[in-house]
Image (cartoon, rainbow, N blue to C red):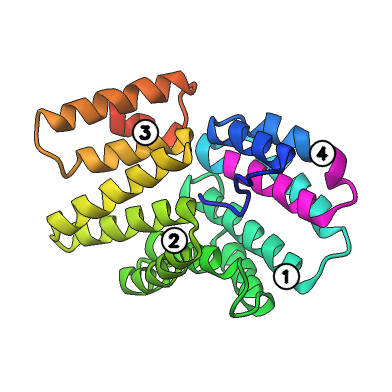
Amino acid sequence: MPHSVRQVNGDPLESAVWRLRSRGCWEDAAALLEPRAASEPKAALARAELLVERCMFTAEGWGRAEEALRAAESLSLSDEERGTAACERGYLAYASTLLRVRDRADEARAALGRAAALLAPDSPGRPLLDFRRGLMAEHVSGNPQAAEAGYRRAHNEAISRGDALLGSYTWRHLAALALLAGETAEARHGFAESLRLREETGFLVGVAPALVALAEVTEEPEAGRLLAEARRLFHLLGGVPRWLAAHLDEEE
């Protein structure tokens, strides 16, 4: 889901990478980083993050993502960078498990645990790690209480640090838990905030899922309008995220 690759004002390369990533052009974005990735850990990790995210959205490219992670891990990394790599490896294994490509739950837990040991408490990578451990707790371990604790920690840090993209994910997942608990108004607020942040950051590839989530707690005719816009974006972006098709009554 969210990654540390961010739009950075004033850096033409990172801005170009963000524009491609936000439209679901992960391979093209990764190609821009390839020259630097051979020797620069930051670029190698960013490239791996892009290709891991592609797997979650498309259920394809697993070999490319593994290759990029191994390449990043082969460089001389600091503890912070090794923790970031472990977080990505854990997320890739989680995605494989969630999308039923291959059960890698044990690998995911081990890698995320390794990341927790390597990342300092005040590391900029901690909120993302907390969020991903929440995903594991909810969707693999079936422990919504632990998931909410992880999401809440990630959410508070994301908001305080101005990480709008991660905030869009934490809003959405906290809202989904609220909906399960029967708190419809709270869920509607969270889904609306998630959509707002994705639109404000220009994360186009993430807007359709946010529209679908909000439609689930919205009455007609507004719900129909939200779903129609989600379908339009889904087709505009070539049918990604792939898993959204079932929610739009589309053929996979």
Residue 60 on the magenta span: no
Q: CA distance from mark 3 to mark 1?
A: 33 Å
Q: Is residue 251 visible?
A: no
Q: CA distance from mark 2 to mark 3?
A: 20 Å
Front-most of residues 154 and 231: 154
Q: Are marks 4 and 2 in contact (CB under 8 Å)?
A: no
Question: What is the span of residues highlighted in magenta in the rendered image?
Answer: 34-54
- Local crowd size for mark 2, using a 10 Å CA cut-off: few (<14), some (14–19), many (≥20): many
Tag 2, which secondary structure?
helix
Amino acid type, residue under disc 4 in the picture: Glu
Residue 145 at x, y percent in the picture? 31, 73
Measure how far apart labels 4 and 2 are at the Cα level: 30 Å
Disc on the earlier residue, 4 or 3 = 4
In the figure, is residue 239 to the left or right of 123?
left
The residue indicated by pointer 1 is 80
- Disc with the residue nearer the chain's start (2 vs 3): 2
- Nearer the camera: disc 4 or disc 2: 4
Residue 135 numbered mark, or none: 2
